[in-house]
Every structure is written in C-alpha cells, then in structure tokens.
Amino acid sequence: MWNGIQLSGFADEIDMSLEKQIEVLKKLNMSYVEMRGVNGKGLVEYSIQEAREIRKRLDGEGIRLSSIGSPIGKINIKDDFDPHMELYKHTVEIAHEMGTPNIRMFSFFMPQDGGYEPYRESVMDRLGQFVDYAKANDVLLLHENEKDIYGDVADRCLEIMKAFYGDHFKAVFDFANFVQCRQDTLEAYEMLKPYISYVHIKDALWSDASVVPAGMGDGHVEEILKMLKNEGYEGFLSLEPHLSDFAGFHALEQNASQKKKLSGEEAFTMAYEALKQILDKI
C-alpha cells in the first residue's frame, strides 16, 4: 500500500447490522467506512440524535467515516426538487455529526424519452444550488459517475467539473460504472484526473456489464491505480463490491461443485483481497 491512501468501503454490503459491519471491518484492519445503510435504513434517514449514537459506537471501535454514501442527486430530473433539497440539507447536518466533510452524490437520472441535452440547464441549476449550500456549510460534494444520470460518461462528467470543481465539489472515479456505460476507463481517467478526489473500487466486464473483483474486468483498475499513485494521489480507495452473485466465484474455489451465492462478508472480503493484490504489485 502506498503512503497517503486509506482503504474504506460500503459496509452495508457486508450486512445492514452495524455490529456485523464493525466486526468485519476490524477483521480486515480497516478503520474507515463509507456509510450508506445501517441497521435497516439509509444513514441520511436517521435523526441527528440517532446519528450521534451511531457515531459514538463507531468512535468506540476506532472507525471513522470516509464519506456519507448519500442518495443526493439520485432522483429523476423531472421529480420535485424541493423535498430533495431538504433531504440534502439534512444530509449536510448528518455529515457534520458524523465527522466527515465528504458527501457522495449524483447528477440526476435522465428520462428515457430522449437525449440528455434538453435537461442540461435543469441539472446545472440544481447542482449549483447543492454547491452553493456546500460552500456555505463547509462540506465537500463528491460526484459519482453513475449509470443513467447526466454525468454518466466522461465528457459530461468533465462538463460538470468545469462548471463546479473547487474546494466543495470534486469527482469520484468509479471503474465499473464507466464500463457499464461503455466508457473506456483509460480515456475517462485522462479527461478527469485533475478532478479526482475519491475512488470507488469495483470492476466490470465489457461483454455483459457484470461486476467482478478488481483486476478481473475491463476497467483497467491496476493501470489506473498505478497512474494515480505516480500522480501523487492521496485519499480514499473505497470498496463497493456488488459481488454477492459473482458468477465466477465457483471457479475460484477448488472444491466448489456448484455456484454459490456469496455472503456479504465473503463478497466484501473477496473485494478487499483483490484490491490488496493489486496494491501489493504497484
């Protein structure tokens, strides 16, 4: 592992139970979590007092948040924005309570009735409101390149970054999401590298868009991580396994006679080990 990076991950993929999340994170010697869901619901659905209790439990185990894995911006661009803006404001309060400035977010799902360009102005207006509030409340919005949102491929991610990049708005680089959007990740990296502040670790196959462990897909994970290291990247590498139905699992098990559904712990551990193998090489 290179100096200046920390491993984190979406521990709700281990289990929704906070206790189980903590157990597995500690087993893997991880001291950060990107918290999305816990104890049956999304983190941002909790009250501030409830979030305070979650923070106390994490503090007691020496685990901190790398980011809020929020759903902000993950609504249709045609949906009513006012209730979502209120959820965003609450999410900012949760981030303050949980001791992280980082909030993962998105740039709105696009309707299936045409191209993205007709919605560009609405997207930029709403993102601008998010960014203004982030500046006023000292948080950092991390835009993830998610499938079917405005910023799904590299050129639109770059457009967003050119409009809003700064101390309160930066980019998440997600390998698998780009592959699933038929976006070459090496091209995306070259376009977006000045803006990358956070990295999601999952890989995918170009052929069928299925998610696989890092290094087993077409995301050029090892190559890009090596370039990030050489560029002096310092920040989080956050595991987002999505592997519970990993079709190749049986091929990795010497004695497996039939396909087996991975447990959350098995999937998360497999993702962790795949990343560690890459980091040991670079």
Image: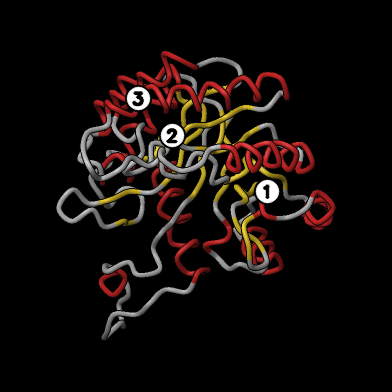
Up-down relation of residue 268 to residue 78 (above or below): below
Residue 31: x percent and y percent?
A: 68, 48
Type of amino acid at the residue the image marks with label 3: Arg
Is there a contact, CB below 8 Å, between mark 2 and mark 3?
no
Query: Which residue was labeled with disc 1?
Result: 31
* Front-lying residue, 2 or 156: 156
- Badge 2: few (under 14), some or many (20 or more) residues near its Cα, within 10 Å? many
Q: Earlier in the sequence, mark 2 or mark 1?
A: 1
Query: Which residue was labeled with disc 2?
Result: 107
User: Which quadrant of the figure has residue 256?
Assistant: bottom left
Would you say 151 lies left or right of 182 here?
A: right
- Badge 3: few (under 14), some or many (20 or more) residues near its Cα, within 10 Å? some
| Quadrant showing the C terminus | top left
Residue 139: x percent and y percent?
A: 67, 27
Residues under labels 2 and 1: Cα distance? 29 Å
Look at discs 3 and 1 and give the one toward the viewer: 3
Query: Which residue was labeled with disc 3?
Result: 120
Would you say 179 lies left or right of 102 here?
A: left
Q: Secondary structure at mark 1?
A: loop
Q: Earlier in the sequence, mark 2 or mark 3?
A: 2
User: Which quadrant of the figure has residue 28?
Assistant: bottom right
| Residue at the image position 31 percent from the left and 83 percent from the top | 255
Look at discs 2 and 1 and give the one toward the viewer: 2
